[in-house]
Image: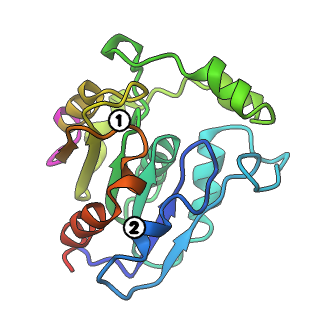
């Protein structure tokens, strides 16, 4: 298993680059840490070059020059999987929190969040609201260690999603926070940081 030389934190569709700060501040390891922002999401300026999750993955990969572990929230988890499939030699570990993982999740009990999300974030890129990325057939290609973090009370990405990802990704380990919802990475920062340190071998 390759030891990571940096950690890249990827936010969800809110684009909140501070989402993972409470976790990052509690990591034991001293390797470099970076927080990614998404053009067109949150406070990061849009870019005409970005029109898909795969474009976001390419943008993030351009920032990586050493073996790197990815820690990703929700939409960021789909981007992280794109990155790991595109450049598996660069991505040493994946930690994926409450993400669809690029699977269709409506049949797994997930709420349709798009209308409410568009109301809350009226400037969100249209391509994202229309996105229907399907990476299901490629999940078995992920060979790096994968840690799945899930809330037992998350209506956006229900526990059944995490359980199915654990079945489809070889060797993936699922950790469930029974009372947690979609913001578990922030609310349970201390425990999440400990799990990530363990996952990375620190």
User: Which residue corresponds to the image point at 20% horizontal and 38% vertical from the top-left?
Assistant: 178
The mark found on residue 175 in the picture is: none
Query: Mark 2: few, some, or many residues within 10 Å (few <14, many ≥20)?
Result: many
In the image, residue 40 lies in the stretch drawn in magenta: no
Query: Mark 1: few, some, or many residues within 10 Å (few <14, many ≥20)?
Result: some
Question: Residue 54 or 191: which is nearer the viewer?
Answer: 191
User: Which residue corresponds to the image point at 56% horizontal and 67% vertical from the top-left?
Assistant: 35
If the image is split into quadrants, where does the C terminus sit? Answer: bottom left
Q: Position of residue 174 (x, y in %)?
A: 18, 45
Which residues are the magenta region?
167-172
The mark found on residue 23 in the picture is: 2
Label 2, secondary structure: give it.
Answer: helix
Q: Which residue is mark 1?
A: 138
In the rendered view, does 18 fall on the left or right side of 109? Answer: right
Question: Residue 96 or 184: which is nearer the viewer?
Answer: 184
Check the image and name the residue furthest to the top.
107
Secondary structure predominantly adopted by residues drawn in magenta? loop
Q: Which mark's residue is nearer the viewer, 2 or 1? A: 2
User: Which residue corresponds to the image point at 66% horizontal and 25% vertical from the top-left?
Assistant: 129
Question: Residue 97 or 185: which is nearer the viewer?
Answer: 185
Marked residue nearer the N-terminal end (2 or 1): 2
In the image, residue 171 lies in the stretch drawn in magenta: yes
Above or below: residue 27 compared with residue 52? below
Check the image and name the residue furthest to the bottom.
30
Label 1, secondary structure: give it.
Answer: helix
Residue 143 visible in the shown view: no
Question: Residue 80 or 95: which is nearer the viewer?
Answer: 95
């Amino acid at each position: 298993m390759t030891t990571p030389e940096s950690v890249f934190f990827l936010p969800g569709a809110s684009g909140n680059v501070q989402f993972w700060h409470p976790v990052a501040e509690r990591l034991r390891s001293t390797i470099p840490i970076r927080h990614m922002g998404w053009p067109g999401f949150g406070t990061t300026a849009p870019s005409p070059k970005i029109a898909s999750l795969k474009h976001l993955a390419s943008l993030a990969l351009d920032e990586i020059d050493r073996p790197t572990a990815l820690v990703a929230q929700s939409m960021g988890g789909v981007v992280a999987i794109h990155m790991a499939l595109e450049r598996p030699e660069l991505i040493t570990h994946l930690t994926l929190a409450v993400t669809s993982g690029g699977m269709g999740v409506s049949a797994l009990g997930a709420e349709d969040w798009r209308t409410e999300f568009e109301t809350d974030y009226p400037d969100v890129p249209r391509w994202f609201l229309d996105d229907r990325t399907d990476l299901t057939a490629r999940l078995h290609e992920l060979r790096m260690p994968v840690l799945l973090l899930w809330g037992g009370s998350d209506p956006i990405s229900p526990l059944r999603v995490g359980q199915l990802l654990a079945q489809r990704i070889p060797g993936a380990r699922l950790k469930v926070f029974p009372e947690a919802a979609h913001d578990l990475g922030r609310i349970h920062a201390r425990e999440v940081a400990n799990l990530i340190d363990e996952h990375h071998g620190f």
